[in-house]
Image: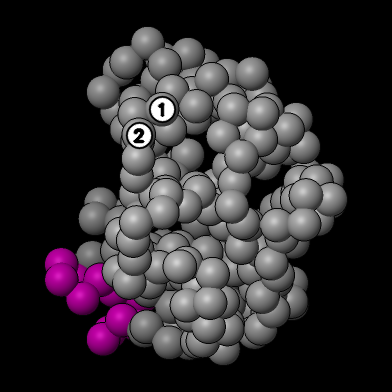
């Protein structure tokens, strides 16, 4: 890939954004820039950025726009002459506008999965807390119901994976992200892919990337 491409991927919680991102990275030489992963790394390593971000997170607050923009732009400037895929950012119109001023994107991939499908998908999700292994009763069930395949320890369902909590998260996502979607529509770089499953959406993205990453 000779040209440097700058792409962001948008999608509601449990819309398959992580799976789609990993498939893109497997097929193209992109640097994955995940705001969530980077924040967790800074918090784990106790950096000055991590300490500041943790203050907001511990109080159940969103990390402010000005902080997130500064944080993400500092990471992107390290990727000189590399194509990148931005995941989990921007989340507000203000973030999108500031990102555009500093690092204009080539295009934005927007995943649209019906909310009822997401709620149904997430209610079957269980996790082994010590390892982070994730199971789903519909398509990745544990060998023994309620037990981790490796250790045999109990699996739990996270509070925010319960249907009412998921519904609330989806509403918040929609309210926050609608202005971001509108912003990228105005810039004529938004490409929306609809479907009920990742496998249904992925071939459409493959076709789009093949046509546009030249």
> Which image quarter holds the C terminus?
bottom left
Q: Write the residue at 31% across / 81% down.
A: 142
* Residue 208 image point, x, y percent: 56, 77
Q: Main secondary structure of the magenta part?
A: loop
* Cβ atoms at labels 1 and 2 below 8 Å apart: yes
Callout 2 secondary element: loop
Q: Write the residue at 34% across / 66% down.
A: 28
Viewer-proximal residue among 111 and 98: 98
* Residue 120 image point, x, y percent: 64, 79
| Residue assigned mark 1 | 77
Magenta stretch encompasses residue 143: yes
Vertical comparison of 101 with 88: above or below: above
Callout 1 secondary element: loop
Q: Residue furthest left?
A: 151
Q: Which residues are magenta?
A: 142-152
> Left or right: where does residue 137 sit relative to residue 30?
right
Q: How many C-alpha atoms fall within 10 Å of the one at disc 1: few (<14), some, or many (≥20)?
A: few
Q: How many C-alpha atoms fall within 10 Å of the one at disc 2: few (<14), some, or many (≥20)?
A: few
Vertical comparison of 136 with 65: above or below: below
The colour scheme used here is: one colour
Viewer-proximal residue among 9 and 209: 209
* Residue 152 image point, x, y percent: 19, 71
Magenta stretch encompasses residue 204: no
Give the label on residue 80, or none. Answer: 2
> Left or right: where does residue 189 sit relative to residue 125?
right
Q: Is residue 198 visible?
A: no
Q: Write the residue at 70% across / 57% down.
A: 189
Vertical comparison of 44 with 201: above or below: above
> Left or right: where does residue 199 sit relative to residue 51?
right
């Amino acid at each position: 890939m000779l040209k440097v491409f700058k792409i962001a991927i948008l999608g509601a919680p449990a819309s398959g954004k992580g799976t789609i991102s990993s498939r893109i990275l497997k097929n193209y030489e992109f640097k994955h820039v995940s705001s969530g992963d980077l924040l967790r790394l800074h918090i784990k390593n106790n950096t000055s950025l991590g300490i500041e971000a943790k203050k907001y997170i511990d109080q159940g607050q969103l990390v402010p726009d000005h902080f997130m923009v500064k944080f993400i732009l500092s990471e992107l400037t390290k990727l000189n002459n590399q194509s990148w895929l931005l995941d989990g950012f921007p989340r507000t119109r203000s973030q999108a506008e500031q990102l555009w001023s500093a690092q204009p994107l080539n295009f934005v991939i927007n995943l649209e999965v019906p909310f009822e499908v997401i709620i149904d998908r997430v209610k079957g999700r269980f996790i082994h807390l010590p390892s982070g292994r994730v199971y789903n009763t519909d398509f990745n069930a544990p060998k023994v119901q309620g037990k981790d395949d490796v250790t045999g320890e109990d699996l739990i369902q996270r509070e925010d994976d319960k249907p009412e909590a998921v519904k609330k998260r989806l509403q918040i996502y929609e309210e926050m992200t609608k202005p971001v979607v509108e912003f990228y529509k105005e810039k004529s770089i938004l490409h929306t892919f609809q479907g009920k499953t990742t496998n249904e959406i992925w071939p459409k993205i493959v076709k789009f990337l093949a046509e546009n990453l030249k």
